[in-house]
Image: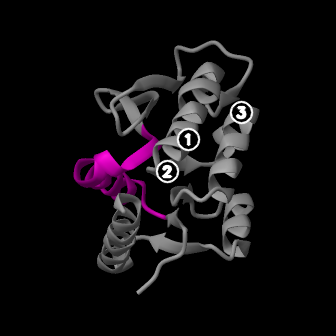
Amino acid sequence: MSFKKNLALRVGDEALKKRLIARLVSNYSYWLGGFFTVEIRSGSAREGFMLKTPGGRAEIMASKAILSPVSFNKYGVSLPALDGLAALSLADARRDGKIALMDELGPLTLESEKLAAAALETLASAAPCLATFRKGARHFEDSFIKMDDTEVLDLDAAGLSGVLARLDGWMEWWIKRLAE
């Protein structure tokens, strides 16, 4: 069995995505580069988002406490985190022969020219890429569907077991090739 180079998960359930990313990082962190996002919470209130790498680096990506010329909903956006850690983590993944994780591609990604360019370069490179994007994000949805080397899966409760099986198969297939 062979797999396409890129796997894109269309996320319909954020709680499932959070669990899936945690599972991926726990099981495959050695083979992953790139970045993922986690919520910053104060009790039950969301205060922002942290950008993390599977290798353990982290920076605040968006927060109610950040004053920035770029904002997303009620959060100020840290362009240095997007231009720096996020974009560089994709370059590192390509250089180091890792699977490039790009969690939560969306409007924030497009706020950083460096991150948008790094994401496009990574998707077009030889590196296998695992990307997530929100269901209904037409720009990303349309782009991924048009890419011949990309498979798009829907991440929702109804199809979770199938997505997990496909994702594990894709990861193992690429890990075998990267290890050769």
C-alpha distance separating marks 2 and 3: 16 Å
Label 3: state its secondary structure.
Answer: helix
Q: Amino acid at mark 2?
A: Ala
List x then y, in percent, for residue 179: 34, 59
List x then y, in percent, for residue 14: 42, 54
Q: Earlier in the sequence, mark 1 or mark 3?
A: 1
Q: Is residue 143 above or below residue 101?
A: below
C-alpha distance separating marks 1 and 3: 11 Å
Q: Are marks 1 and 3 in contact (CB under 8 Å)?
A: no
Q: Are marks 1 and 2 in contact (CB under 8 Å)?
A: yes
The answer to whether residue 112 shows anywhere in this view is: no
Residue labelled with disc 2:
100
Q: Earlier in the sequence, mark 2 or mark 3?
A: 2
Asked if residue 25 lies in the magenta stretch, the reply is yes
Q: Is residue 37 above or below residue 104?
A: above
C-alpha distance separating marks 1 and 2: 6 Å
Label 2: state its secondary structure.
Answer: strand
Q: Residue furthest bottom?
A: 1
Residue labelled with disc 3:
114
Q: Residue furthest left?
A: 27
At x 28%, y 27%, the residue is 43
Q: Quadrant location of the C terminus?
A: bottom left
